[in-house]
Image (cartoon, rainbow, N blue to C red):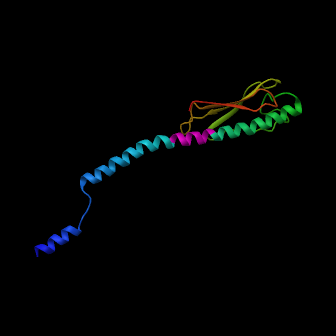
Amino acid sequence: MLRRFNAYMADDRGFTLIELMVVVIILGVLAAVAIPLYTDYIKNARTSEGIARLGAVMTASKAYHQRYNKWPKLASDAGYYADFSATKHFSYKIDSGGGGTGAFSLKATGLDVDGMKGVDITMTCASVSAEGVITVSGI
């Protein structure tokens, strides 16, 4: 009878408390490393959204400059077809150079949603034939 009991106990194995605590500690360390990396990844993805939108607005601004030989001054200028409506994470505006023929600058300002407050994206074009230079701050 004792043999049967010993054989039964040998087959009924489980995890010890120490083994379970080691697994919990390992999972805690992985979570502590992964969560900040994930939030940075999300913030960069949202910043890419703002950069893409500024690129589209800059393209419309260059088209306006080609037609009227000056940069647009306001989003409502006749013949200027750019979308300056705010998105969930950014508001957009002409930063500088509007109405002139020199450098032109657009700006996306992060809204106080999902950690984007304080993030600013600026796209500057030295001339209508130059590529836009993107500057991101606040990340």
Quadrant position of the C terminus in the picture? top right
Specify the quadrant of the image occupied by residue 136: top right
* Residue 54, horizontal then vertical, whole percent: 71, 36
At 83% from the left and 36% from the top, the residue drawn is 63
In the rendered structure, the answer to whether residue 65 lies left or right of residue 115 reads right
| Residue 103 higher or lower than 76, as above or below | above
In the rendered structure, the answer to whether residue 106 lies left or right of residue 111 reads right
| Residue 126 higher or lower than 29, as above or below | above
Res. 135 visible in picture: yes
Quadrant position of the N terminus in the picture? bottom left
Specify whether residue 87 is painted magenta: no
* Residue 131, horizontal then vertical, whole percent: 76, 33
First to last magenta residue range: 39-47
Q: Nearer the viewer, residue 53 or 24?
A: 24
Specify the quadrant of the image occupied by residue 6: bottom left
At 88% from the left and 33% from the top, the residue drawn is 67
* Residue 114, horizontal then vertical, whole percent: 54, 40
